[in-house]
Image (cartoon, rainbow, N blue to C red):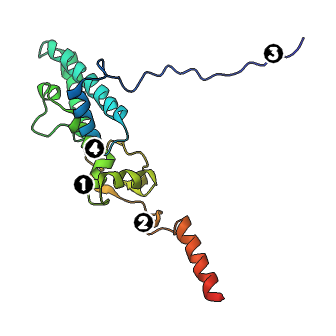
Amino acid sequence: HGLKIFKMRNYRNCSKTYRTPRRPFEKERLDSELKLVGEYGLRNKKEVWKVQLILSKIRASARILLTLPENDYRRIIQGKTLIKRLRKFGILEEEKQTLDNVLSLKIQDFLERRLQTLVFKTKLSESIHHARVLIRQRHISVNSQLVDVPSFMVGLKTQNSISLFSKSPLGGGLPGRVRRKTLKQEIRNNTE
């Protein structure tokens, strides 16, 4: 009798993070998506669809809560937590803290809170596309912690702590690979 070796598999029930449009060639939708991709420097339309799915889930939960009576326990608690979460990321403004205003949220409200957009708006980059490059090349930190995800949702508390990463060549760290190579060549040329 030989030994039976069991393979351990990591089964994870992952749901999709985006939903493709029902009508793939609707001109108005294609144009509006392309405008969003260009305006916010997104990589592709899948990034727009991801935000759309998040927004639709939030709006659906708000719609369900609005059907309940106003003094219902579930509506009060879940409504407050939903509004608190949206306020934490700066998506809902201070004076618009009702479930009705959650229904009137747009995709732009979410895209404005991405790290890529905020890096561009704080003048750390020359363009929205340059902001994405800086983030992916590990030059940006939030709250003095390195973040290399352009779609990172920045909270209101950490919004003012977006800066160049201290260990990055742009933030005063050691020189990068190309700069080290040129310095080595300059030293070699000076000795000859």
Badge 2 or badge 3: first in the primary sequence: 3
What residue is shown at x 51% (from left), y 69% (from top)?
A: 175
Q: CA distance from mark 2 to mark 1?
A: 18 Å
Q: Nearer the viewer, mark 2 or mark 3?
A: 2
Badge 3 or badge 4: first in the primary sequence: 3
Q: Position of residue 77 (x, y in %)?
A: 22, 23
Image quadrant of residue 28? top left
Three-letter amino acid code of the residue under disc 1: Lys
Image quadrant occupied by the C terminus:
bottom right
Image vertical order of residue 171 relative to residue 155, above or below = below
Q: Position of residue 22 (x, y in %)?
A: 30, 17
Q: Nearer the viewer, mark 4 or mark 2?
A: 4
Image quadrant of residue 3? top right
Three-letter amino acid code of the residue under disc 4: Gly
Residue annotated with mark 3: 4
Residue annotated with mark 4: 38
Tell me the SS state at disc 1: helix
Question: What label sits on residue 121 in the rendered view?
Answer: 1
Three-letter amino acid code of the residue under disc 3: Lys
